Image (tube, rainbow, N blue to C red):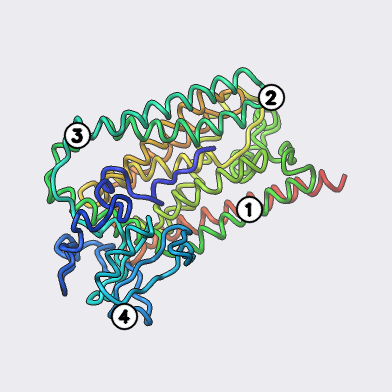
């Protein structure tokens, strides 16, 4: 899987349209009227029944800023000879200075008010005041959509015109053209005009607190897993290079599996990668998807889903794949994606819709990229992993709980068993690689 799901690092366009503080003159729109003393407009949209409906997720105001107005700077800038750096907290003496500062800064990520002990993200600075007009909404998206289309077309054409640059050109097409193109097409199709002002505000608040909750969840075990993948890759590179690492000793080689009975390769293949770009993209994708899966259901599910879908992806590759040799964690990553899609269906009433939209977007992008790069991408493994994750999600559907405080013993057992199998797979890879390197 070359594409990295990044929808959890930003709120979607629909939720952000009237929240760009400082870009067009904050004072002219009078947004401070939504922050009368001792009032916090978004509190009424926090149900307190969801694990992320917690104001403690907002960053506390620094001690030296308590009781003052202030901002956290969003980008390096200079005002009247004074340099402000991204992330710097700037305090002013009065509301009048505050009003003058924001438009001059040009960007801010968080705001500070004298009567609120938390820093307010700009996405929550102003509530939606009116519904969207569909024609205007689509007109604003249209120009960006066309631009993304032409970027995608140009880079894809370059990829096929220069075969030596195909991989790099297609990756650029995905990052700078295809990914935003699919996102914009999906955004254009949304009937945002049917959403009431209350629903728009509720979605904005839910999105911001959900995003912060996901980012705040522990991810230690996930980082350990990524460390194992990196260690395996470094061992591969020690027998070759970061661009041509050793893969044959433990890759999914059809002849070795069928003729020699080396079925252990259906696991070891998912822990190896073909080059530095391959592991970089897969690592980012696994981390992005893994931290959401761990937060929403249980850390115990991650290793189990990953292992099972690596296997289903490998089996699909064995019988349906075109190439004789295959490596990569793609099947397990797509399996996590498929499992998450089922989770968003089960908890669709409370999980922000942008998560499901991002997962669908990623699936479409991976499918298109796989079709364009079929010469070097194992699409059978992708499909097998994705379908395996969906099937697992359906099987575990009745027992899923949203952000449970404890894990059922059977799930813990499956988790530990999966971890042992994956560690055994990593050990087998090390043995096979060291034998080749030593010889």
Image quadrant assignment for residue 147: top left
Distance from Cα at disc 4 to Cα at disc 1: 53 Å
Looking at the image, residue 414 sits to the left or right of residue 214; the answer is: right
Among the 4 quarters of the image, the one containing residue 31: bottom left
- What crowding class fits label 1: few (fewer than 14 Cα within 10 Å), some (14-19), or many (20 or more)? some
Q: What element carries label 2?
A: helix
Sequence-first disc among 3 and 1 = 3
Depth check: give the residue in front, 190 or 396: 190
Is residue 143 shown left or right of residue 373? Answer: left
- Identify the residue position indicated by label 4 in the image: 66
Q: Which of marks 1 and 2 is in front?
A: 2
Between discs 4 and 1, the one toward the N terminus: 4
Instruction: State which tag comes first along the sequence, 3 or 4.
Output: 4
Please name the residue that numbered disc 1 is placed on. 424
Q: Of 86 and 403, which appears nearest the observer?
A: 86
Circle 2 sits on which residue? 164
Q: Dot 1 lies on which element?
A: helix
Closest to the camera, between mark 3 and mark 1, is 3
Q: Residue 191 carries which label?
A: 3
């Amino acid at each position: 899987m070359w594409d990295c799901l990044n929808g959890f690092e930003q709120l979607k366009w629909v939720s952000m349209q009237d929240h760009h503080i400082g870009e067009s003159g904050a004072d002219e729109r009078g947004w401070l009227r939504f922050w009368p003393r001792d009032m916090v407009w978004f509190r009424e949209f926090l149900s307190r029944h969801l694990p992320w409906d917690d104001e403690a997720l907002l960053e506390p105001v620094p001690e030296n800023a308590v009781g003052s107005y202030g901002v956290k700077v969003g980008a390096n800038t200079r005002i009247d000879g004074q340099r402000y750096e991204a992330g710097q907290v700037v305090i002013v003496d009065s509301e009048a200075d505050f009003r003058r500062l924001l438009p001059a800064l040009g960007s801010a990520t968080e705001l500070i008010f004298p009567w609120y002990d938390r820093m307010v993200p700009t996405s929550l600075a102003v509530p939606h005041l009116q519904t969207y007009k569909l024609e205007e909404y689509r007109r604003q998206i249209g120009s960006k959509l066309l631009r993304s289309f032409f970027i995608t077309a140009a880079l894809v054409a370059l990829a096929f015109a220069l075969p030596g640059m195909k991989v790099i050109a297609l990756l650029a097409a995905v990052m700078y053209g295809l990914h935003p193109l699919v996102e914009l097409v999906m955004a254009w199709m949304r009937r945002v005009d049917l959403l009431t002002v209350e629903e728009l505000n509720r979605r904005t608040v839910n999105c911001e607190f959900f995003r912060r909750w996901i980012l705040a969840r522990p991810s230690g075990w996930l980082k350990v897993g990524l460390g194992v993948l990196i260690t395996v890759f470094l061992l591969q590179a020690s027998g070759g290079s970061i661009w041509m690492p050793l893969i044959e000793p433990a890759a999914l080689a059809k002849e070795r599996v069928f003729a020699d009975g080396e079925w252990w390769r259906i696991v070891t293949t998912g822990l190896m990668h073909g080059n530095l770009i391959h592991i970089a993209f897969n690592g980012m994708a696994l981390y992005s998807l893994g931290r959401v899966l761990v937060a929403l259901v249980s850390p115990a599910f991650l290793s189990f889903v990953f292992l099972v879908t690596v296997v289903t992806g490998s089996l699909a590759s064995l019988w349906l794949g075109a190439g004789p040799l295959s490596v990569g964690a793609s099947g397990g990553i797509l399996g996590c994606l498929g499992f998450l899609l089922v989770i968003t269906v089960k908890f669709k009433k409370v999980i922000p819709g942008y998560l499901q939209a991002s997962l669908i977007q990623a699936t479409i992008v991976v499918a298109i990229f796989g079709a364009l790069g079929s010469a070097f991408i194992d699409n059978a493994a992708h499909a097998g992993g994705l379908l395996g994750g969906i099937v697992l999600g359906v099987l575990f559907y009745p027992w899923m709980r949203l952000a449970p405080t404890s894990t059922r013993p059977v799930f813990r057992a499956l988790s530990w068993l999966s971890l042992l199998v994956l560690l055994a797979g990593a050990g087998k890879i090390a043995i096979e690689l060291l034998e080749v390197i030593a010889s």
